[in-house]
Amino acid sequence: MRWRCGGRFVGVMRISTSSPRATDLHLQRPATVETPQAEAVPARIMAGSPGGAPEEGAAVDVAVDERLDRMWNVIIWNDPINLMTYVTYVIQRLFGYPLEKATKLMLEVHKDGKSLVASVPREKGEHYVGRLHGFGLQATLEKNS
Amino acid sequence: MYLAVSKTDNGDFAVVMSTPLFHYLSLLPDRLRDALDSPDYATRAMRRMFPPGYSDPEKESEYQDLVKGDLLQQRLQKIAAFEGIVAQGSVSNSEGKLLIRAAEFDACLSFLNDLRVLLGEELEIEDDDWERDIDPDDPRADKVLMLHLLGYIEQGLLEATGMVDFEIDPEDL
């Protein structure tokens, strides 16, 4: 059903598909996963000095990998009941994303069935998933692979 | 039946609606409270309202132990918050008025959505192609109407926030 408020088209009352299945929760790490603004990773990677020892760069790579290994992906799943606008609003409220990005993530949920909305430490991820559940969205936490 | 929502200068939300809609809103808290009273978590509706957080069974068990009770309490608190908002509203023969404080807005919105989720599960809605236009004599008609009405109210509140894009083109979906 399409909704109109004040005579304007306001979206479509559906945001679809099935509940997450235990066997369908494993995601590959996308190349452009972002952390929420409040969870921004500090700029720990320092540019090596000209002619600097390669070991330093290698150490940085290891540190980054270890950090990524500790990250967990917060995934929102599609469902046929929540309004698209509601999902967009909740993403903004919880993650502090601007409207454009929240809308993009919501559309990803709608089209692809799920969207990785944040990559954060586990404790923070559990907090987000709990909050998303509190808002009536289906969400899970998956270890970054 | 009509509903108009506007955001005030201090961030609260003023809601004006038709009298029947105001009275209808006053009936909603008990509808959800009854469903959450001694919930059977094995039912479809409760599984949806308290969904899994992990695919790993061990982590999922720990997660549910950690959050399920809190989540239930949060839902009951949101019901109480909505009830309080309606109780402080005013109604006449011509219209009803509510004031939703900014701090209560998410609880109010989330309460309405919880009820939509409950109804959607009771109607066993599985996908986008669910039957939106239903025969009035169908035994599911009341629930479908309620689902639409709650969606209308929810949409009105969301529009007033200015935080959602109402111009999404269905062709882009």
Image (cartoon, rainbow, N blue to C red):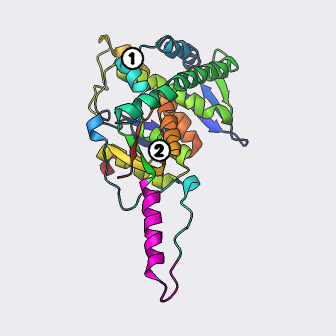
Q: In this view, does A120 lie above or below B26?
A: below
**Magenta span contains residue A55:** yes
Neighbours of disc 1 within 10 Å: few (<14), some (14-19), many (20+): some
Q: As rendered, which of A97 and A141 lies closer to the eye? A: A141
User: Residue at 45% across / 30% down in the picture?
Assistant: B62
Q: Residue B88's spot in the image, x, y percent?
A: 70, 20
User: Residue at 53% across / 60% down in the picture?
Assistant: A41
The disc label shown at residue B96, or none: none
Q: Residue A62's spot in the image, x, y percent?
A: 43, 66
Element marked by disc 2:
helix
The disc label shown at residue A88, or none: 2
**Res. B59 in view:** yes
Q: As rendered, which of A44 and A102 lies closer to the eye? A: A44
Element marked by disc 1:
helix
Residue at the disc numbered 1: B143
Kindly give the residue lying farthest to the bottom in the view shown: A51
Which residues lie in the magenta part?
Answer: A47-69
Q: Mark 1 lies on which chain?
A: B
What is the magenta segment's predominant secondary structure?
helix
Residue B94, quarter of the rendered image: top right
